[in-house]
Structure formats: structure tokens, C-alpha cells
Image (cartoon, rainbow, N blue to C red):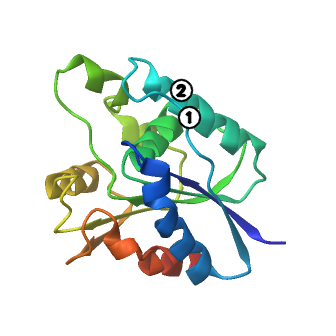
């Protein structure tokens, strides 16, 4: 039976299409023993409640999956995976979480409030859950200090700092696939 990977896209206009090469790279590098699911998140990102719509869709995908699910996400999708996992009780056993260039939302603007992680979020994550985080130093979308903030909060996680690759990691998730295969 193939191992199941759920990949949550990044945000922005055309985020699903933009991240499709990441998913293709991941599937190709993982090989035939894995199946990468890539559902399109459907929400108007200009609407005030869009974060809760994404979180609901993430929850539906996780609930529908078998135990041993591997979670991966890029950018907004990665940050919302952390939010979902830290604010919900899971029925599905998760094998590992792989976060590519997740923003660490902060600030006082109204629009950012629903995206922010709760105080002490790291303690609310499932115990013993392997978490990996990746970001390139030359990410032009998510500042590198967001990576540092996750390092400070997720003390048990593994962090992979990449010298280059931009926000899309040159559409090459082989480093992520190598870690997934080590689970």
C-alpha cells in the first residue's frame, strides 16, 4: 500500500497552479511507493473568514485520510497546517509534518489576526510528531527571520536552511522527499 502525502498549497493569486511544480517534484522524487494528494484550497483570500475556510478544508482532508498520513505544505498552506494541528484534536495518526517556507504571522492588522498562531502553540501540537521546516536564505516572499521564529518555538523540530532556491525552492523538493523517506 502506498504511503499517503497531503500537500497544502501556498496562497496568493494562482497559488495552486504556482505550487503544482513543487508537488510534481515531490511525487517524482518520492517515487511509486507514495501518493501525493494535492487538493485545491477554495476560499476567497480577500474575504475576512478565508483562514477558517482553509482550516476547515485541511481538517476535512486529514479526517478522510488513513493513519500514517504525511502532511506537507508550502507558505500559507504550511503555516495553516501548524495552526490546524495546534488547535484541533486529531483522530488520524500523522507520521510527519513538512513545512516549506511557512510565514510566522504577526502584527496587529485585522486581516492577519485569523492567521496568527496561539500563544504556546508548540505545546499544543501532537506529542512526538516529527516536524521538518525548510527555507532558503534568498526567499523573496517570506523573510528569513520567520524561519528563525519557528526555530525558537519548535525546539524539537528539524530545520533545513537552504542557501538558495527562492520562495519556490527552484521547484525542487528533493530535500523534503529525502526526509520523508527517512520517516
Q: Residue 145: give x, y in percent of width and height.
A: 15, 53
Q: Quadrant of the N terminus?
A: bottom right
Graded by Cα atoms within 10 Å as few (under 14), some (14 to 19) or many (20 or more), the crowding at tag 1 reads few
Residue 137 picture location, percent across and down: 17, 68
On the image, numbered disc 1 is attached to which residue?
A: 42
The answer to whether residue 80 of the structure is visible from this angle is: yes
Q: Position of residue 62 (x, y in %)?
A: 67, 44
Q: Residue at x 18, y 59 (%)?
A: 140
Q: Residue at x 36, y 25 (%)?
A: 46
Separation (CA) of disc 2 from disc 1: 8 Å
Callout 2: SS: helix
Whether 17 is drawn above or below 90: the answer is below
Direction from residue 115 to residue 110 in the image, left or right: left
> Given this view, does label 2 or label 1 mark the residue nearer the observer?
1
Quadrant of the rendered structure where residue 164 is? bottom left
The C terminus lies in quadrant: bottom right
Q: Is residue 150 left or right of residue 5?
A: left
The residue nearer to you, when weighing 86 against 47, is 47
- Looking at the image, the residue that sits furthest to the right is 1
Give whichever of 25, 104 is nearer the camera. Answer: 25
Quadrant in the rendering for residue 169: bottom left
To which residue does mark 2 refer? Answer: 53
Which residue lies at the image location 75% right of the left edge and 54% below the top edge? Answer: 67
Q: Earlier in the sequence, mark 2 or mark 1?
A: 1
Tell how many labels. 2
Residue 100 in picture, x, y percent from top left: 38, 60
Whether residue 98 is visible here, answered yes or no, is: no
Quick one: label 2, few (<14), some, or many (20+) residues within 10 Å?
A: some
Residue depicted at 32% across the width and 58% down the height: 101
Q: Are marks 2 and 1 in contact (CB under 8 Å)?
A: yes
Is disc 1 placed on a helix, strand or loop? loop
Q: Nearer the viewer, residue 107 or 120?
A: 107
Amino acid at each position: 500500500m502506498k504511503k499517503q502525502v497531503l500537500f497544502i498549497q501556498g496562497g496568493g493569486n494562482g497559488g495552486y497552479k504556482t505550487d503544482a511544480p513543487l508537488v510534481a517534484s515531490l511525487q517524482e522524487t518520492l517515487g511509486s511507493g507514495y501518493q501525493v494528494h494535492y487538493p485545491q484550497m477554495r476560499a476567497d483570500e480577500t474575504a475576512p473568514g478565508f483562514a477558517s475556510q482553509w482550516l476547515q478544508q485541511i481538517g476535512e482532508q486529514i479526517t478522510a485520510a488513513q493513519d500514517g498520513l504525511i502532511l506537507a505544505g508550502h507558505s500559507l498552506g504550511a503555516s495553516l497546517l501548524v495552526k490546524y494541528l495546534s488547535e484541533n484534536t486529531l483522530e488520524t495518526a500523522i507520521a510527519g509534518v513538512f513545512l516549506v517556507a511557512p510565514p510566522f504571522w504577526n502584527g496587529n492588522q485585522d486581516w492577519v489576526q485569523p492567521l496568527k498562531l496561539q500563544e504556546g502553540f508548540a505545546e499544543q501540537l501532537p506529542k512526538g510528531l516529527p516536524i521538518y521546516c525548510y527555507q532558503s536564505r534568498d526567499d523573496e516572499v517570506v523573510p528569513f527571520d520567520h524561519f528563525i521564529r519557528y526555530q525558537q518555538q519548535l525546539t524539537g523540530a528539524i530545520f533545513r536552511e537552504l542557501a538558495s532556491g527562492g520562495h519556490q525552492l527552484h521547484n525542487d523538493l528533493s530535500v523534503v522527499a529525502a526526509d520523508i523517506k527517512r520517516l
